[in-house]
């Protein structure tokens, strides 16, 4: 199968001649080893119920490719947040939308269409959004079909969450592995299999169970958030970390914290205890500033 990753040639400062390569999709589920010395890093641009976006960048030599995982801000907000990462919209080579909830979609359609950036999402996510027209920029993502970004690959995997067909990602440059996982109700065996062996994780730590229980949320909302298709409690995230921890796991970012039902110190303490790390070894993605750039591996 040789479907093009990039629908039409677009200019890029990273490629001699400014032409992006037409990269083939990989066979189902495979993630390639790249022969060149590559580097993988990521930067969260903000995380929480008000908006989520993370840049994943793979580079070798002077070439870099960047995938924007979720796009949950207005275009001006996104531009401002990219500038803080020394990036412009033109530096984003593809967008991946995990699911249709508004804190993940934001300006994806305007950005993809106006700037001719391919946008990946599941068929279910596209349908749940009302099948918007992406003017040729839509690419359909499927569970365990790797997306080749050139300098790295991104493997979507299905997660349990109350959306039509939510997918999260494992990214690798062939040497190091990054798991990006927000918005899931519980860790299925499939989720755990994808996170096993990751060197860095950006993972949801949505709420503290006691704070959610004591909150002013109506009963139905408590049930939804805390249910098997809602969001992860700190303690559930800690269980996942216990299950996937290995000597190579060196960075953990707690993401999608609830502003009402969690505080960074509680999430840090709970996740750090699962790994026998000091509390401040857990990075918390802020809703406003996200994180610094973090190297993987
Ligand atoms: Zn969300
Ligand atoms: Zn969601």
Image: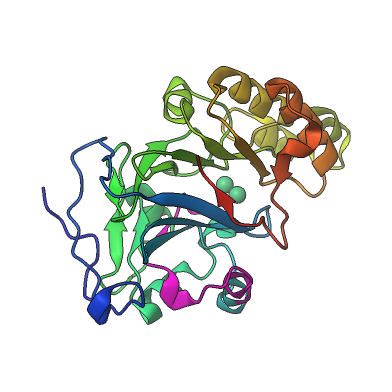
Residue at left offset 65%, top offset 33%: 232
Q: Quadrant of residue 50?
A: bottom right
In the depicted view, which residue is nearer to us: 111 or 238?
Answer: 238
Place of residue 244 in the rendered image (x, y in percent of width and height, measured from the top left): 54, 22
Seen at 46% across and 34% down, the residue is 159
Residue 15 rendering spot, x and y as whole percentages? 29, 72
Please count the marks in the image. Answer: 0
Q: Does the rendering let one see residue 19?
A: yes
Task: In this rendered view, identify the residue nearer to me: 286 or 250.
Answer: 250
Q: Is residue 262 visible?
A: no
In the depicted structure, whether residue 263 falls above or below residue 140:
above
| 2 sits left or right of 151 in the view | left
Q: Is residue 257 above or below residue 226?
A: below
Q: Is residue 127 left or right of residue 33?
A: right
Residue 263: x and y in percent read 83, 42
Q: Nearer the viewer, residue 134 or 145?
A: 145
Q: Tell me which segment is drawn in magenta.
A: 80-101
């Amino acid at each position: 199968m040789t479907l093009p990753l990039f629908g039409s040639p677009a200019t890029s400062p990273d490629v001699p001649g400014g032409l992006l390569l037409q990269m083939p999709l990989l066979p189902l589920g495979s993630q390639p080893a790249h022969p060149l010395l590559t580097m993988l890093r990521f930067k969260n641009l903000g995380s929480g119920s008000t908006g989520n976006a993370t840049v994943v960048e793979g580079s070798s030599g002077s070439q870099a490719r960047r995938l924007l995982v979720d796009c949950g801000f207005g275009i001006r907000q996104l531009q401002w947040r990219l500038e803080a990462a020394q990036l412009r919209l033109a530096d984003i080579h593809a967008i991946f939308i995990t699911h249709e909830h508004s804190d993940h979609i934001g300006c994806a359609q305007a950005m993809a269409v106006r700037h001719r950036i391919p946008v990946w999402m599941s068929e279910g996510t596209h349908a749940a959004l009302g099948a918007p027209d992406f003017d040729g920029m839509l690419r359909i993502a499927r569970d365990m079909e790797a997306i080749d970004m050139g300098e790295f690959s991104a493997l979507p995997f299905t997660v349990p969450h109350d959306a039509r067909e939510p997918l999260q990602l494992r990214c690798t440059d062939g040497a190091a592995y990054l798991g990006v996982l927000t918005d899931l109700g519980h860790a299925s065996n499939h989720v755990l299999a994808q996170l096993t062996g990751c060197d860095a994780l950006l993972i949801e730590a949505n709420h503290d169970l006691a704070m959610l229980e004591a909150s002013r949320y109506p009963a139905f909302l408590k049930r939804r958030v805390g249910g098997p298709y809602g969001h992860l409690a700190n303690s559930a995230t800690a269980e996942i970390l216990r299950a996937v921890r290995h000597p190579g796991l060196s960075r953990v970012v707690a993401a999608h914290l609830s502003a009402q039902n969690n505080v960074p110190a509680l999430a840090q303490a709970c996740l750090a205890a699962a790994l026998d790390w000091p509390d401040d070894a857990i990075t918390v993605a802020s809703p406003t500033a996200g994180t610094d750039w973090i190297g993987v591996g």
